[in-house]
Amino acid sequence: MHLRARIERLAVLKALLPMPCIRIEWIPVQLVALGLLGFDHLQLVYQPDDLGAASRQDDWYVMEGVREVGRDGTFLGMEGANGRTTLAVANLAAREALIAKIGTPELRGSRRLACDGAAFGAWETMASYARDIEEQDYPYIAYGLPGSPTPTINSSSAIASLIHYSGLETSGRLPFGLHMSPGTTTLLGTGGNDILRIDQSFTTLLGGRDTDEFFGGSDRNRVDKFYGGEGDDLFHWSPGFNIVHGGQPGLPYAHDGLDVMDYSGAGTVHITFNAIGSPTRCRTTSWCSPPGSTTCSPSSASSGTTPPTASCLARASISSRTTSSSIRAALTPRKEEEPVRRSMCTARAS
Ligand SMILES: [Ca+2]
Ligand SMILES: [Ca+2]
Ligand SMILES: [Ca+2]
């Protein structure tokens, strides 16, 4: 047999072999009892082989973010984080009863993200990160307005984060027929040290536990949001109006850590305090001493009423650059037993 004929035959045989696939799908939220705002709910499924798709969905594995109501609040949980939960088990139904509950893959706009020998490894990686997200106790926030201090943290955020960590080249593929599903631009950090960057895919970054470092984007017209979570986190300034929170919504201030805002190279930085918030919760190290150096010294220059109870620490390096930046740091209360109220520090570099 000629070489070319052999190659063509091998290609045909390969096409006939069952290949594992990772798919992304959507389900209207009313079907998963979320009942919030009419958004669609994303899920990832692992199809052990790509043959007989519609009839064998009972055995497909599923991973999805879920809304968990606990005594201390509402949190983002992960269903199927073991990587071996089937659609039948997750939905407590099989065959026709399962179709009646969640429809067929076609009705869910099922779309392949990966369909090759690497799919299993990518799925295992996703499951590992799903367990990490499950342990983070991120607050579940169905929708936060783009310019508000509130992030969107929902099931779509979990799915987008898992795809990011899997390393799959998905080019932002979403299920066919998806309606509204906010949260896909939120990246959830891990329980370890993370270096997180704003890019074309993510405009909201959450560090979670441990020491995390954040880098912003260059688009001045977009509001980027950063939330350090627990631990001592470091934020680098970036152009435009951004929201920087050393902790995250609902996190007791005592768990926040000592977070640092680095304005090196930003130009002149002006820091003001929100008169509505309690000024006793903000101390700002705002001015470099002497000007032009990168050494910061404690100051209460902005309001004259700022006792030294550290919550946001800004490093300002005065240079000849004229880049402007406006950054708001929303801070949660220091005392754990206090209700969640924010005091604000607003920093403007010009
Ligand atoms: Ca982290
Ligand atoms: Ca952190
Ligand atoms: Ca922190």
Image (spheres, grey):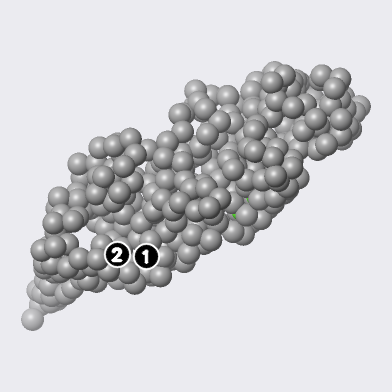
The quadrant of the rendering that contains the C terminus is top right
The image quarter in which residue 309 lies: top right
| Camera-nearest residue between 169 and 234 | 234
Residue at 59% in and 31% down: 243
> Helix, strand, or loop for circle 1?
loop
> Helix, strand, or loop for circle 2?
helix
Residue at 28% in and 45% down: 29
Q: Position of residue 269 (x, y in %)?
A: 75, 23
Look at mark 2 in the image and give the residue it sits on.
Answer: 90
Report, in whole angstroms, how far the alpha carbon at label 2 lies from the one at label 1. Answer: 8 Å
For badge 2, the amino acid type reads: Ala
Residue 72 shows in this picture:
yes
The quadrant of the rendering that contains the N terminus is bottom left
Direction from residue 259 to residue 105 in the image, left or right: left
Direction from residue 242 to residue 93 in the image, left or right: left
View extreme (right): residue: 290
Direction from residue 175 to residue 171 in the image, left or right: right
Q: How many marks?
A: 2
Residue 260 shows in this picture:
no
* Label 2 vs label 1, nearer the camera: 2
Look at mark 1 in the image and give the residue it sits on.
Answer: 80
Q: Are marks 2 and 1 in contact (CB under 8 Å)?
A: yes
Q: Residues within 10 Å of mark 2 (few under 14, many from 20)?
A: some
In the depicted structure, whether residue 216 falls above or below residue 114: above
Q: Is mark 1 within 8 Å of ligand 1?
A: no
